[in-house]
Amino acid sequence: MTASIPTTNRAGRGLSPIIGDGLFVLSLALIVVGDVVAFNQLATQSPTDAIVPILVFVIGAAGLIETLRRAFFAGSGRVRPSAVIPALASLAAFVMWRRATPVGWSVILTLAATVFFGSLAIRDLRCSRSTDGANEDSAQIRGLLCLAQTLVLAYVALLAAADAGPTVFG
């Protein structure tokens, strides 16, 4: 008898929601790693050094994982248009990191990610009209996490811009 991978869980929902939840947790873990390394850079070095872990981990790697989650495991069976934004930001972050672009471009990308996280926070915090209590609670938790990440991104971006001074693009 051959063993096969089960295609449904106990609730009969399939593996797609489980994989999607796993990718969500992985993206949260990458965001936490990026934030910890960035605050370590703020404490030990300079804000211009702190923006690099934000680019690599938060915008780059977590953005790539979030793109995969939104594109393939959204639950609706179709590719969501909102998967394009983290994909483009992730691509830009990796290019900026590899080419060692000036701090100003990193600040602009980080502020764009701040706007994206802020819009997700507003959407999730205002979207409490669901009749299912579990969905309402998870939307509020996602909204609060996005709000916290919005504040972290804005803080690091503004500190990096202030630290770079007049040579922010050169």
Image (cartoon, rainbow, N blue to C red):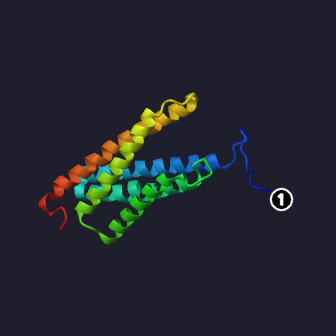
The structure residue drawn at horizontal position 12% and vertical position 60%, both measured from the top left corner, is 166
Callout 1 amino acid: Thr
**Label 1: how many Cα within 10 Å (few below 14, some 14–19, many 20+):** few
The reply to whether residue 65 is in sight is yes
Figure quadrant of the C terminus: bottom left
Q: Circle 1 is placed at which residue position?
A: 2
Residue 51, how many percent across, how many down?
A: 29, 56
In percent of the image, x 37 and y 39: which residue is there? 147
The image shows residue 93 at horizontal and vertical percentages of 36, 62
Q: Under tag 1, what secondary structure?
A: loop
Q: Is residue 45 visible?
A: no
Q: Quadrant of the N terminus?
A: bottom right
Front-most of residues 163 and 114: 114
Relative depth, front residue between 145 and 135: 135
91 with respect to 46 (left or right) = right
Q: Residue furthest left?
A: 166
**In the displayed image of the protein, which residue is found farthest to the bottom?**
99
Residue 160 point in image, percent of width and height = 22, 54
Left or right placement of residue 57 versus residue 170 in this view:
right
Q: Furthest-right residue in view?
A: 1
Taking 153 as reference, is 136 left or right? right
Residue at image location 28% in from the left, 55% down from the top: 50
Residue drawn at the location 17% of the way across and 59% of the way down: 164
Q: Is residue 27 left or right of residue 98?
A: right
